[in-house]
Amino acid sequence: MMIAVCEEEGLTQAQFIEKLLERELTERGLIDVKTSHS
């Protein structure tokens, strides 16, 4: 499972889900990662 792989990389399940959501929103154009951190 993808979650198991991410845990091996030091990510918790919560962090993994957060990254998935952020990527999903970015792909839909709801947020812009480049501008949200500036």
Image (spheres, rainbow, N blue to C red):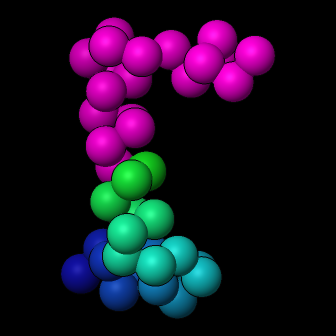
Q: How many marks?
A: 0
Q: Residue at x 32, y 59 (%)?
A: 17
The part of the image, by quadrant, that contains residue 6 is bottom left
Q: Nearer the viewer, residue 13 or 9?
A: 13
Tell me which residue sits at (52%, 76%) in the image: 11
| Residue 26: quadrant of the picture | top left
Instruction: Answer left or right for 10 relative to 30.
Output: right
Q: As displayed, is residue 35 above or below residue 20?
A: above
- Most extreme residue toward the right is 38
Residue at image location 64% in from the left, 11% down from the top: 35
Magenta residues span 20-38
Q: Residue 28 appears at what percent x and percent y?
A: 26, 17
**Residue 23 on the magenta span:** yes
Main SS of the magenta part reads: helix
Q: Is residue 15 left or right of residue 14?
A: right
Quadrant location of the C terminus in the rendered image: top right
Taking the image as shown, residue 32 lies to the left or right of residue 16, namely right
Query: What residue is shown at x 58% (from left), y 80% (from top)?
Result: 9
Residue 9 vertical position relative to residue 34 in the rendered view, above or below: below
Q: Quadrant of the N terminus?
A: bottom left
34 w.r.t. 1: above or below:
above
| Relative image position of residue 34 (x, y in whole percent) | 65, 17
Tell me if residue 30 is in the magenta stretch. Answer: yes
Q: Quadrant of residue 33?
A: top right
